[in-house]
């Protein structure tokens, strides 16, 4: 056998399972079709850590609650940016108030603690800037905001350092059951293994003809606001109302704010902004750094081990709370796989991510010390986010280093500022080309068909 376990998909769940399995004496490989891992993580590198209160599905609620409890130890161990924020789920009308009370009672029955049912007076005391009609609200003290990409990268880098083989830019074409184990066929290779974990269901493989494709019928319209925006809330806010639209306000890890509209209709930016005005009041559009559109997934995440006797497990479904559930899912899947293989815990497992420096978070003394070690940390490339050349170079040279502009962006935060990269994108591309020994015309934004420089004038040596 080439491997004991093959993990299909380098999303956040695949990386988390790779980390958990790398604690054991197993030969493991992870296959990802894209240039970089964790491509399923949202573009805005801030995700809410839920506690299961808002979930209708009991299984998903339990996974969120379990993940919520596990994530606190993980962020401390991996040194991942995390901020504790309480949350408010607000009912705007009588019907939503009844739904909210039912939601609260379900949460209590599920054993979720540190939640409270508040009247409108108390809500306005907590958030005087609210511009909506408040009936009741659930106040939770279990929630927070995390950098999901940092979480995924941490899982992957530690797994890599502990022997997991990452195969990027390989697409799985088929999974076949053979006399002993499986044959996994990609566009580049053929591998044999004892067990397969498929975290990317959607295609029909020979081993499994019943893959389910998630179809999201809702849309999420997100406005990323500048750090200077003064209308931010103290809590994570979400609303319930009769028309089914939901409004969200989340403070980002980087210090800005995200205002979002979840709707069943694919409305445009202007209509989305009108709904935001009803929520928070008029906003100076100069405060809006960016506008993003994405599907809103609310599918049930299922760990399907119905073929475990053959050695095949799959994780199906997409859900907005996937980041919160990831530690729980990884723990459950790892336990299932380990119980079916003859393996023991490694004695030399290194449960630590290699040191990383974020220039904007350092004191002046710390900055001076690191500049003495590497003067590239003294050259700021992205002024909006205070990201230095040293950080960009490190993101490229690290385990599973960045090979695209999007990968650098997510690892360091470059181009997320007010100018959206207009002042620094060409510098970042030049650094990436230099460090990977490529031409500027070979540098891509995030995929093979996304080159940023189609051709160049031969008289110039620099971009």
Image (tube, grey):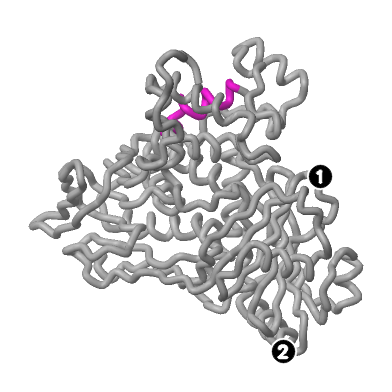
Query: Where residue 98 sits: x, y (%)?
Result: 72, 88
Residue 228 image label: 1
- Residue 225 visible from this viewpoint: yes
Q: Earlier in the sequence, mark 2 or mark 1?
A: 2
Find residue 284 and report its image quarter. Answer: bottom right
Q: Is residue 64 above or below residue 383?
A: below
Q: Is residue 393 above or below residue 191?
A: above
Identity of the residue drawn at 69% across and 55% down? 258
Left or right of 334? Residue 407 is right
Left or right of 411? Residue 447 is left
Q: Can you tell which of label 2 and label 1 is closer to the viewer? A: 1
Query: Where residue 192 sits: x, y (%)?
Result: 16, 47
Q: Nearer the viewer, residue 216 or 329?
A: 216
Q: Secondary structure at mark 1?
A: loop
Q: Nearer the viewer, residue 375 or 285?
A: 285
- Tell me where the magenta segment starts and ends, as one range: 389-402
Q: Secondary structure at mark 2?
A: helix
Q: Nearer the viewer, residue 194 or 130?
A: 130
- Does residue 393 belong to the magenta stretch? yes
Q: Is residue 149 above or below residue 113?
A: above
Residue 95 image label: 2
- Residue 114 visible from this viewpoint: no
How many C-alpha atoms fall within 10 Å of the one at disc 1: few (<14), some, or many (≥20)?
few
Q: Is residue 9 above or below residue 447?
A: below
Identity of the residue drawn at 43% across and 54% down? 13
Identity of the residue drawn at 68% across and 39% down? 417
Disc 2 and disc 1: Cα gap in Å?
37 Å
Location of the N terminus by quadrant is: top left
Query: Where residue 298 sits: x, y (%)?
Result: 51, 71
Residue 63 image label: none
Left or right of 280? Residue 252 is left
Q: Main secondary structure of the magenta part?
A: helix
């Amino acid at each position: 056998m080439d491997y004991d376990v093959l993990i299909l998909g380098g999303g956040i769940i695949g990386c988390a399972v790779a980390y958990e399995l790398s604690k054991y004496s197993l030969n493991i490989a992870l296959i990802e079709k894209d240039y970089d891992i964790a491509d399923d993580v949202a573009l805005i590198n801030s995700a809410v850590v839920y506690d299961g209160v808002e979930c209708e599905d009991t299984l998903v609620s339990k996974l969120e609650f379990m993940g919520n409890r596990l994530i606190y130890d993980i962020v401390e161990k991996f040194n991942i940016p995390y901020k504790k924020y309480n949350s408010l789920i607000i009912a705007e009308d009588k019907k939503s108030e009844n739904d909210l009370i039912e939601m609260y009672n379900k949460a209590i029955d599920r054993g979720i603690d540190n939640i409270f049912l508040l009247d409108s007076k108390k809500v306005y005391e907590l958030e005087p800037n609210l511009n909506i009609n408040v009936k009741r609200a659930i106040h939770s003290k279990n929630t927070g905001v995390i950098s999901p990409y940092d979480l995924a990268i941490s899982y992957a880098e530690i797994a890599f350092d502990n022997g997991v083989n990452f195969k990027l830019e390989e697409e799985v074409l088929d999974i076949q059951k053979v006399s002993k184990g499986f044959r996994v066929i990609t566009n580049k290779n053929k591998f044999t293994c004892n067990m397969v974990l498929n975290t990317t269901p959607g295609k029909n493989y020979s081993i499994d003809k019943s893959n389910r494709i998630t179809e999201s019928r809702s849309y999420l319209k997100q406005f990323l606001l500048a750090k200077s925006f003064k209308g931010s809330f103290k809590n994570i806010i979400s609303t319930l109302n009769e028309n089914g639209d939901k409004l969200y306000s989340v403070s980002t890890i980087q210090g800005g704010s995200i205002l979002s509209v979840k709707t069943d209709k694919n409305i445009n930016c202007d209509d989305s902004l009108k709904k935001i005005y009803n929520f928070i009041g008029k906003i100076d559009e100069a405060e809006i750094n960016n506008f993003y559109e994405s599907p809103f997934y609310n599918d049930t995440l299922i760990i399907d081990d119905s073929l475990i006797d053959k050695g095949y497990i799959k994780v199906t479904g997409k859900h907005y709370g996937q980041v919160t559930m990831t530690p729980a899912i990884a723990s459950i899947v790892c336990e299932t796989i380990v119980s079916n293989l003859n393996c023991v815990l490694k004695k030399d497992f290194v449960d630590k991510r290699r040191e990383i420096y974020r220039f904007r978070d350092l004191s002046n003394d710390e900055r001076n010390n690191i500049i003495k070690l590497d003067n590239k940390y003294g050259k700021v490339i992205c002024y909006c986010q205070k990201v230095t050349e040293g950080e960009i170079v490190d993101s490229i040279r690290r385990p599973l280093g960045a090979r695209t502009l999007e990968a650098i962006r997510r690892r360091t935060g470059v181009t997320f500022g007010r100018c959206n990269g207009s002042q620094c994108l060409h510098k970042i591309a030049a650094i990436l080309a230099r460090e990977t020994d490529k031409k500027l015309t070979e540098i891509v934004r995030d995929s093979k068909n996304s080159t940023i420089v189609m051709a160049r004038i031969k008289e110039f040596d620099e971009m």
